[in-house]
Image (tube, rainbow, N blue to C red):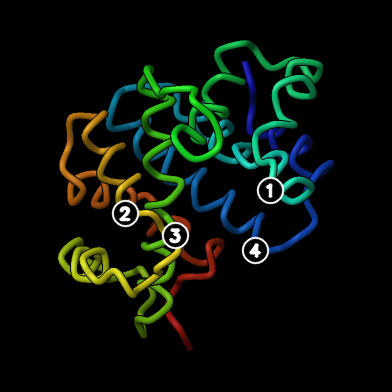
Amino acid sequence: MLTLKRARQLLDTTTTQEHLFLHAKNVMVAMGGLAEHFGENKEHFMAIGYLHDYDYEQYPEEHLRHTEAPLKEAGLTDEEVRAILAHGYGHCNDVEPVTVLEKCLFTVDELTGIIQAAARMRPAGITDMEVSSFMKKFKDKKFAAKCDREVIRQGCEMLGMEVKDVAAICIEAMKQYADELQIGRKE
């Protein structure tokens, strides 16, 4: 089973840009929150979340096309590789998310971008963010415009949950890592 330590080692071999590591951490933390919600293995969900953009820096235009073979060679299981591939469903490939792990990753990849952006605009960062403030930003299509809201809605639907409920879980999880995610209280 993929561990967080191993996920970090693997991502270090393909990624150098700080903003990509920050995104990996955001997704990792949100995945941990959802794992707890669904009664799943938290470290495993976090490890998959951290590693999900394994090939992105090297192949941004061919994202996820250079993931399967190297990760299988590195010892990931078919299920772990499939979970990573499934976050690209509809825009990079046709690997449809079917497991809870796959659906969570598909959903939070875009969702954490809006949460991060919203938190950065607040004097107290994410520390006092309520889901209602997030939802205002979510509804504003010009805010964090690159984050695909339709993917988020689709993922939440797959999970059988409302956007606000998934966002609330992710926000609470991210609050615990506010400083590491660079969204803590501003001095």
**Between disc 3 and disc 4, whose residue precedes?**
4
Looking at marks 4 and 1 on the same chain, the residue that comes earlier in the sequence is marked by 4
Which residue lies at the image location 75% right of the left edge and 31% below the top edge?
A: 66
Q: What residue type is labelled 4?
A: His
Q: Is mark 3 on a helix, strand or loop?
A: helix
> What whole-number distance in Å separates the C-alpha atoms at marks 4 and 1?
17 Å
In the image, residue 121 above or below residue 3: below
Closest to the camera, between mark 2 and mark 4, is: 2
State the separation of the CA atoms marked 1 and 3: 19 Å
Instruction: Indicate the amino acid at tag 3.
Output: Gly
Amino acid at pointer 2: Arg
For this rendering, which residue is in front, 180 or 31?
31
Q: Name the residue under label 2.
A: 149
Q: Seen from this angle, which residue lies furthest bottom?
A: 187
Give residue 148's quadrant in the image. bottom left
Which circle marks residue 113 in the picture? Answer: 3
Picture coordinates of residue 144, whole percent (x, y): 40, 69
Kindly report which numbered mark, 1 or 3, lies closer to the viewer in this rendering: 1
Give the residue at x 55% y 13%. 79
**On the picture, is 135 further left or further right than 68?**
left
Position of residue 110 relative to residue 43, above or below, is below
Instruction: Give the quadrant of residue 102.
Output: top left
* Residue, disc 4: 19
Q: Tell me if mark 4 has few (under 14), some (14-19) or many (20+) residues whose alpha carbon lies within 10 angstroms of its own.
A: few
SS state under label 2: helix
Residue 182 location (% of width, % of height): 53, 69
Dot 1 or dot 3, earlier in sequence: 1
Residue at point 34%, 36% (across, down): 34
Label 4: state its secondary structure. helix
Mark 2 neighbour class, 10 Å CA radius: few under 14, some 14 to 19, many 20 or more: some
| Residue at the spot of label 1 | 61
Residue 61 at x, y = what percent?
68, 48
